[in-house]
Amino acid sequence: MTDDLDAQDSEIQDLAADMRERGRSWADIAHELAIPVATAKLAVDQAHHRAAERVARDQIALF
């Protein structure tokens, strides 16, 4: 069950980050995903953090 919730959280985070990168407002993202604005901001931050970790792992694998 936890894996399902983590996958769902990651999906919401990725959606929020994609919407923000396309210029959508925080209020619009929150409304679209049915989450509070603060949660939308946190979701985008977490998606960016996961992406940075992926890049770091990929770079380590190259060396």
Image (cartoon, rainbow, N blue to C red):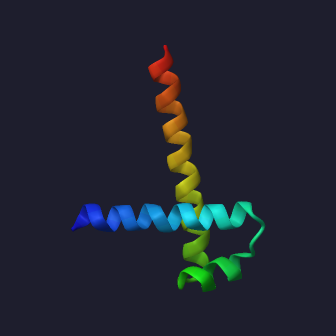
Screen quadrant of the N terminus: bottom left
Instruction: Give above or below for 33 relative to 18.
Output: below
The residue at 49%/68% (across/down) is 12
Q: Quadrant of residue 6?
A: bottom left
The answer to whether residue 14 is left or right of residue 22 is left
The residue at 70%/65% (across/down) is 20
Instruction: Give above or below for 36 relative to 8.
Output: below
The answer to whether residue 61 is left or right of residue 26 is left
Residue 61 % position (x, y): 45, 21
Please give the count of numbered marks on the rendered protein: 0
The residue at 53%/24% (across/down) is 59
Residue 47 % position (x, y): 54, 56
The residue at 49%/13% (across/down) is 63
Residue 32 % position (x, y): 60, 82
Residue found farthest to the top: 63
Residue 8 % position (x, y): 39, 67
Residue found farthest to the left: 1
The answer to whether residue 20 is left or right of residue 47 is right
